[in-house]
Amino acid sequence: MKKLVLLRHGESVWNKKNIFTGWMDVKLSNNGIIEAKNAGKILRKNKISFDIVYTSLLNRAIHTTWEVLYKLNLTWIKVYKTWKLNERHYGKLQGLNKDDVLNKYGIIKFQNWRRSFKINPPKINTNNINYPGKDKKYKKLKKNNIPVGESLLDTYNRVIPYWKKNIYKNLLKNKSILIVAHGNSLRALIKYIENISDKNILKYEIPTAKPLIYEYKNKFNIKKKYYLKI
């Protein structure tokens, strides 16, 4: 079996400002563009190529994908975009500075909303201008599939079925795959791949634009796991 590479998008403008982002479709920062280009360079240096790419419907992930594939001279390969790889939806917290939320609500609520496995953040109202149902990218989604505030468990419950139905079958066909997504959607996938507990996955940090490589032996047994050094 070939390699599976997971890549969190480069730094976004809201990452830089310490703002809850979620499904808000912000752009890469200038530093994030550089990070994405460097990810492509290090993959090229290590002679890692891909047959298929999966990414989310959010600009920061798609633009990171573009930069990586350009550096690898692979802009022609198939890229599948899906909302199921979107970042966790942070509900009413989206657009708020994390320090302001911490100061207003205290450390316990802040940590529960930000990093618990099962607790949802405060939900966004469907009348809110930032409700995803008002975005044309999601016009084909059923209303009950459009989140108003997700826990990591909710994110897990959309990422893993997509993995099983679409991505895993291509790994079994010996395809080399790149997934460019987000901190929480990748955290959900890593939890499943490595069978990490609900508690321990909350401590798992994923750096921006640093390729995480999985090499496999028979079927889906992990032979080796490592980050490429930028």
Image (spheres, grey):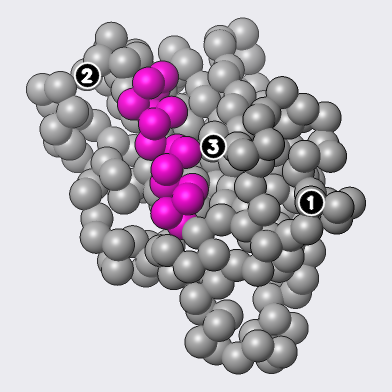
The residue that mark 3 highlights is 85
SS at circle 2: loop
User: Quarter of the image holding residue 223?
Assistant: top left
The residues colored magenta run: 152-167
Foreground of the two, 22 or 16: 22
Q: Quadrant of residue 198?
A: bottom left
Answer few, some or many: residues within 10 Å of disc 2's Cα (few below 14, many 20 plus, some between 14 and 19). Answer: some
Q: Could you tell me the amino acid type at mark 3?
A: Leu
Amino acid type, label 1: Thr
In what quadrant of the picture does the N terminus appear?
A: top left
Q: Are the residues flagged by discs 3 and 2 in contact, CB closer than 8 Å?
A: no
In the drawing, does residue 110 fall left or right of residue 136?
A: left
Mark 1 Cα within 10 Å, few/some/many (few <14, many 20+)? some
Q: Is residue 118 visible?
A: yes
Is 46 in front, or is 77?
77
The answer to whether the residue labelled 3 contacts the one labelled 1, judged by CB atoms less than 8 Å apart, is: no
Tell which circle, 3 or 2, labels the residue nearer the N-terminal end: 2
Q: Position of residue 83 (x, y in %)?
A: 61, 33
Q: From the viewer's side, name the closer residue of 144 and 147.
A: 144
Q: Quadrant of residue 206?
A: bottom left
Q: Is residue 42 visible from the viewing direction of this image?
A: no
Residue 67 in the image: x percent, y percent? 66, 31
Identified at 57% across, 80% down, the residue is 110
The dot on residue 126 is 1
How would you classify the magenta stretch by its main secondary structure? helix
CB atoms of marks 2 and 1 within 8 Å: no
Left or right side of 169 for 130: right
Magenta-span inclusion, residue 160: yes
Q: In the displayed structure, would residue 7 be above or below residue 114?
A: above
Q: CA distance from mark 2 to mark 1?
A: 44 Å
- Residue under label 2, please give it: 1
